[in-house]
Image (tube, helix red, strand yellow):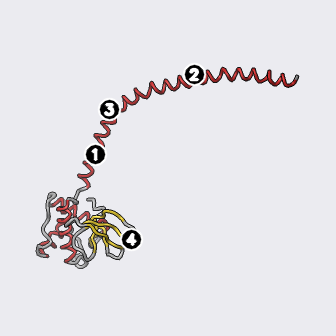
């Protein structure tokens, strides 16, 4: 699950996509209404890639939980964040049985389900496996195109290389003859100076 460039801003509802970076701010776009505005260093910004969920063992990355929800729901939307807290907590316990119920607040649980559905609606919830498959298909097509082009490129390149070698050999032969003539002429000039 790739959440790169998706952020949450404390005090503002929903999620935002980073569009550009200015001198003292970043330009973000709301995933709810696509409105753009600047976010400053004074805003409390959290990248979804960096968010983890407290568990009794190691913290679990949020993207792993979102991937688990995606898999459980077969790529569809999950229960609304407006469901009762017990329903959402039970759902979360199925996916992450060791999450720390004391440290993960009820508002955080609701936020996770809200974020999942928001990412789903906006089309930003993409599994890395699907992206990897698409990349593999593109690579296969590129390799097959390259494989069919390589022999013709070699056939065209080979005669040019042979012609270039012949031309260089001919140039060397031509330049060698005048050089020999100059060597003969040079001593005559020097012998004339001696007389």
* Front label number (3 vs 4): 4
* Mark number displayed over residue 136: 1
Element on which disc 4 rests: loop
Say if residue 60 shows up in the picture.
no
User: x, y percentage for residue 16?
Assistant: 26, 67
* Mark number displayed over residue 37: none
Distance, label 3 to label 4, CA atoms, is 50 Å
Quarter-of-image position of residue 14 = bottom left
Element on which disc 3 rests: helix
* Front label number (2 vs 3): 2
Which residue position is annotated with label 2? 170
Q: Measured along the vertical axis of the image, is residue 86 above or below residue 156?
A: below
Quadrant of image for the C terminus: top right
The residue under the point 51% across, 26% down is 164
* Front label number (3 vs 1): 3
How crowded pointer 1 is (Cα within 10 Å; few <14, some 14-19, many 20+) is rated as few
């Amino acid at each position: 699950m790739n959440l790169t460039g998706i952020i949450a801003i404390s005090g503002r509802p929903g999620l935002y996509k980073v569009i550009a970076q200015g001198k003292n701010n970043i330009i973000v776009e709301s995933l709810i209404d696509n409105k753009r505005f600047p976010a400053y260093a004074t805003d409390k910004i959290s990248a979804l890639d960096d968010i983890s969920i407290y568990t009794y063992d190691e913290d679990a990355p949020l993207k792993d939980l979102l991937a688990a929800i995606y898999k459980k729901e077969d790529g569809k939307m999950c229960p609304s964040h407006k469901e009762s807290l017990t329903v959402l907590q039970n759902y979360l316990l199925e996916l992450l049985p060791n999450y720390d119920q004391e440290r993960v607040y009820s508002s955080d649980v609701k936020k996770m389900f809200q974020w999942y559905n928001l990412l789903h609606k906006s089309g930003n919830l993409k599994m890395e496996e699907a992206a990897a498959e698409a990349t593999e298909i593109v690579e296969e097509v590129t390799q097959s195109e390259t494989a069919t082009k390589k022999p013709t490129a070699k056939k065209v390149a080979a005669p040019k290389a042979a012609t270039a070698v012949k031309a260089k050999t001919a140039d060397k032969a031509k330049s060698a003859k005048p050089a020999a003539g100059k060597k003969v002429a040079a001593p005559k000039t020097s012998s004339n100076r001696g007389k």
